[in-house]
Amino acid sequence: MNSVSYVSSSAHGVGQLVFHLEWCTKYRYKMLRQPRFKDLLAQVLLREADQSGLKVEEMGIGDEHVHLVVDIHPTHCISSVFESLKTESARALFEAEPKFRLRYPKGHFWSPGKFYRSVGDVDLPTVRKYVREQDHRQKQLADYQNAQAA
């Protein structure tokens, strides 16, 4: 796993699309306490990420939640990324430990909720300053924003 995300390029674009993702087990049950479940989950997430064209830069697995920092391709949408990671990992965990079905008889291992935030190697004030300095029409933008607020 890389510690630094770089701008990537494709046939028609250049950019950086990195997200911090987090999701939890349903009801926040501590289903991942055993190291073997964390190891299996890590293996499945890395395999699914590789198959989906994601680059996992960081991963943290707690007893009832997962954190990932992933670099995604611009053709992916964040909801499909969550769907594939959560679906495949739940399937593998249920196969590895059939007793999980006693806790989750309907097969919903993960909570439907999720957290995501875009991250990058520059912060919002730096980007705003850069964009603001590209054009001197900031008064038009301020007038527009004031009209929207009214």
Image: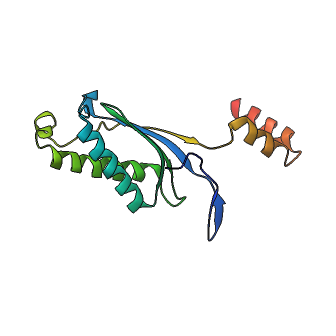
Is the C terminus in the top left, top right, bottom left or bottom right quadrant? top right
- Give the residue at x 18% y 43%: 107
Horizontally, residue 108 falls left or right of residue 145, namely left
Horizontally, residue 29 falls left or right of residue 83, namely left
Q: Position of residue 77 (x, y in %)?
A: 47, 54
Residue 128: which quarter of the image? top right
Residue 139: which quarter of the image? top right
Q: Is residue 20 above or below residue 73?
A: above
- Give the residue at x 35% y 32%: 62
Q: Position of residue 30 (x, y in %)?
A: 25, 28
Q: Is residue 41 above or below residue 148?
A: below
- How many numbered dots are placed on residues in this image? 0
Q: Position of residue 78 (x, y in %)?
A: 46, 49
Q: Position of residue 46 (x, y in %)?
A: 38, 52
Residue 32 visible in rendering: yes
Horizontally, residue 70 falls left or right of residue 47, namely right
Q: Is residue 10 above or below residue 132?
A: below
The residue furthest bottom is: 11
Residue 114 visible in rendering: no
